[in-house]
Image (cartoon, rainbow, N blue to C red):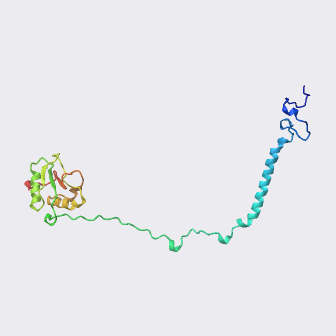
Amino acid sequence: MASPGKTSFLPDRFDDVERDLSYVGTHRRQRSSWSVFAPIGIGLGAVIVLVLAGLWFVDRSDDYLTLDASEIPVISGDAPEEESADEPVVLEPEVPEEVVAVTDPTQIDTEGLTLTILNGTSTQGMAARAVERLVAVGWPEATATNADSADVQQSVVAYSEDADKAIALGIAGELDLDADAVVQTTAYPGARVTVVLGADYVDTEST
């Protein structure tokens, strides 16, 4: 039985090795009471070495870290005279080009020009008589028919392409309609210019 206070080990093959005071098996060596301080000592030593190395590096680099005041650029808030902002440019509103109404259809190429006159009132034959007024001054024969509604109040001269605006203005003038009646729309795809006669239109039969 092992003596109290003395470390005992189970027997193994190291018991057959000749005893040698200069060699102690790792598994039987007693841990020194100072061994718990070994990691702390190693850490403190490493910190000291790093601090000393840093101080040495800063001391050696001091001359390179000093800035020459003459080399520091000075930034002024004022722009150079040659780079100063130009005077603000005031853009004038673009004035749309005035479209002149075609008053003499014989002066333009009317080939391929399609016209439709719609009667938007309850007065019979008003669209056909409007066509006669246009043909008499040189406009091509138009299609005359009734509109979907018979109670249209304001007459309309509709065109879809920008190039036909002058033609629409000329037709409106020939029918004694105001220029405000001329509108650009794609609501009437059946012809390049479509006239919808309303209650404000003065029929030739009543004049």
Q: Please, which residue is most extreme toward the bottom here?
A: 82
Picture coordinates of residue 165 (x, y %)?
22, 60
Q: Nearer the viewer, residue 199 or 54?
A: 54
Picture coordinates of residue 117 (x, y %)?
14, 53
Relative to 105, residue 155 above or below: above
Q: Please, which residue is most extreme toward the top here?
A: 1
Relative to 1, residue 98 above or below: below
Give the residue displayed 71% in from the left and 66% down from the top: 64
Q: Nearer the viewer, residue 189 or 198?
A: 189
Relative to 75, residue 202 above or below: above
Give the residue displayed 84% in from the left and 32% down from the top: 13
Q: Quadrant of residue 18?
A: top right
Q: Nearer the viewer, residue 34 or 155?
A: 34
Q: Quadrant of residue 76?
A: bottom right
Q: Nearer the viewer, residue 94 or 162?
A: 162
Count of labels shown? 0
- Quarter of the image for the N terminus: give it: top right
- Quarter of the image for the C terminus: give it: bottom left
Left or right position of 142 against 73 = left
Left or right position of 175 against 61 = left
Q: Quadrant of residue 191?
A: bottom left
Picture coordinates of residue 51 (x, y %)?
78, 55
Picture coordinates of residue 69 (x, y %)?
68, 70
Left or right position of 138 against 7 = left
